[in-house]
Image (spheres, coloured by chain):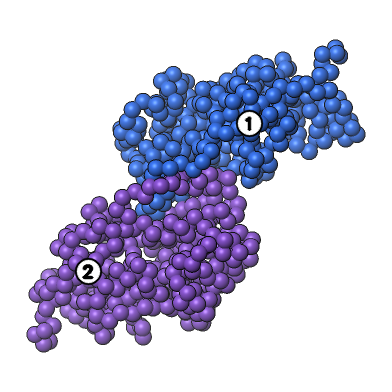
Chain colours: A purple, B blue
Amino acid sequence: MPQTDRINRRVLLASRPHGLPSLQDFRLDEAPLPEPGEGQVLLRTLYLSLDPYMRNLMNAEGARYAPAVAVGAPMVGGTVSRVLTSRHPDFRVDELVLGNAGWQDYALSDGSDLSPLGDMAQPSLALSALGMTAFTAYVGLLDIGQPQAGETVVVGAATGAVGAVVGQLAKLKGARVVGIAGGADKCRLAVEQLGYDACLDRHAPQLAARLAAACPRGIDVYFESVGGVVLDAVLPLLNDHARVPVCGVIAHYNDDAPATGRDHRPELLSTVLQRRIRMQGFVILDHYAARYAEFRHEMGEWLASGQVKAREDVVDGLERAPEAFIGLLEGRNAGKLVVRVAGG
Amino acid sequence: MPQTDRINRRVLLASRPHGLPSLQDFRLDEAPLPEPGEGQVLLRTLYLSLDPYMRNLMNAEGARYAPAVAVGAPMVGGTVSRVLTSRHPDFRVDELVLGNAGWQDYALSDGSDLSPLGDMAQPSLALSALGMTAFTAYVGLLDIGQPQAGETVVVGAATGAVGAVVGQLAKLKGARVVGIAGGADKCRLAVEQLGYDACLDRHAPQLAARLAAACPRGIDVYFESVGGVVLDAVLPLLNDHARVPVCGVIAHYNDDAPATGRDHRPELLSTVLQRRIRMQGFVILDHYAARYAEFRHEMGEWLASGQVKAREDVVDGLERAPEAFIGLLEGRNAGKLVVRVAGG
């Protein structure tokens, strides 16, 4: 192994951001290659997943489902890695594993957070179409949203990592599917490549009126990951007994202070009441034990048959992760954002 | 039948209220006794139910579940009546029926909205402990809230018509039950007569801190019928996977314009997401077909055994209905508000 490989590049949280993170909130650091102890493996990161939830973990209070990243510590994140050295009986050298190595070239693991991936021609799929975001789409849409054939499903972030899968699964179930996305390019992609019946540009004027026109029979399932003005446009159109799986509120992740001006909560509660709406938050970590195996099986078949297409947005180089992550929070990517950290 | 009885006193909607209704929004009117046609019955109102939903029907837009009351028309409402004259094969004279005669002494019906009550020693029970509000408590708490033994249930309006039953049913299911009510007297009633483990005065300072102290293990079910500051106090205490049946938002029924100041919706959405909360609105009319028979059977047994006690707040005289209804919206009653229109 050449000397240069004995350096572990890591992206650390340099400071806690206020609002949208800037490049200064991250620091690229070099540390010695860690040595696996007995019962540990040394992992080489191949692909790193970048996801909006990471923004929450940059705040001092962290999130209910995971603690905050400490200032000066590597950013956390899901990864596909190759086992370089194994002192663990269950893992062999060269094996591909899904884990949580974070934003770094190398990491140690005691194996408890690793899942063997077997042989995969395209290992990044374990972070995209077969990964956490696609599983989020599957559980949120199918288990909570429960779309019926002929119903109308609206996807708040139509071309995002989760939304791109939600849209395709909703079509598969026979629903009319209307997306909302930021910009004409994404809307074109949604209709032409993801099969949406219509997709509306969030930035163009009169979103509410355009959404009403695109949903002549109202909305039965609203897959919420945005909040804000998108929810404003959706609420008046929700049908009786509509379901609203809540998988994110990305419009508010960078809020530093409570918004002022008008309180939208009473109107939300009245709508939930009068239209008998079920609004349900979910965090995908809760669902692996009960649903992951079936997801993996079904999604594998849909991918193989071409009924669902993987949409990846691959960025090359660990050093570009901060910039790519900021772009994700600004809505600049389309499909699942993945960093290729090493060639494979 | 004496001449005076040939007058039908009715309480009409005189004008659409802005905010809290005033007595001037109602008008007591006298009309001739209606004559039943073929297939109709003439009903004498014995008891009239007064319920917060009626406030929504005073607005021009009405509600999703029922149209607005027209200005100049009698206020609508659920009633227990006696059949005075029958030209309908299924109803006999003197029979007790549950129906929707509204705020008036007499009414006609084609029978389609009537349920025979059989012999009842206390007919008002059909509007209280065996009526719509108790059924609301039953469906909302048991079907949507699903409290488990040892969990903590919070009831936003502890001594209201619905809340008084929710609290008792939650105790029956083995939960710790904490109520919130307006005033020390109601709180005393909640603990001493309804079996609440604790009840907090909404009007006293530091509701949030007192609620936190009363719910040391957090909140698993919040029975929402209030909104506003009560919801503000509840939100930070909701446990992961908490359930929030929404049966009303009485704090906002009199809102004329959207509230301003601070937007509480982003915080609500974040809480729903991070704590995987299921918030579900329901309108009791949807549930009669599937659940009423079982409710009636179970509740009848609980009443007979004394496990649930009927709490009625009976007002004498149709002419007092407007004043009693305004008091209901102001939170002045305790238990189910019923107007005794005629002796029986």
Where on the picture, by quarter, is residue B179? top left
Q: Nearer the viewer, mark 2 or mark 1?
A: 2
Q: Any mark on residue B131, and which?
A: 1
Vertical relation: A278 (above or below) B301: below
Measuring from the top left, give residue B63's x and y in whole percent.
63, 43
Measuring from the top left, give residue B280's x and y in whole percent.
51, 47
**Residue A198 in sight in this render:** yes
Where on the picture, by quarter, is residue A52? bottom left
Q: Residues within 10 Å of mark 2 (few under 14, many from 20)?
A: few
**Residue hosting label 2:** A23
Measuring from the top left, give residue B156's x and y in whole percent.
45, 34
User: Same chain, marks 2 and 1?
Assistant: no
Kindly give the residue lying farthest to the bottom in the view shown. Answer: A2
Instruction: Give, as a three-letter code, the residue at label 2.
Output: Leu
Give me the residue at 50% from left, 64% from top: A205
SS category of the residue bearing label 1:
loop
User: Quarter holding the C terminus of chain B?
Assistant: top right
Kindly give the residue lying farthest to the front in the view shown. Answer: A205
User: Quarter holding the N terminus of chain B?
Assistant: top right
Vertical relation: B177 (above or below) A152: above
Question: In the image, B328: left or right of B289?
Answer: left
Kindly give the residue lying farthest to the top in the view shown. Answer: B2
Cα separation between marks 2 and 1: 62 Å
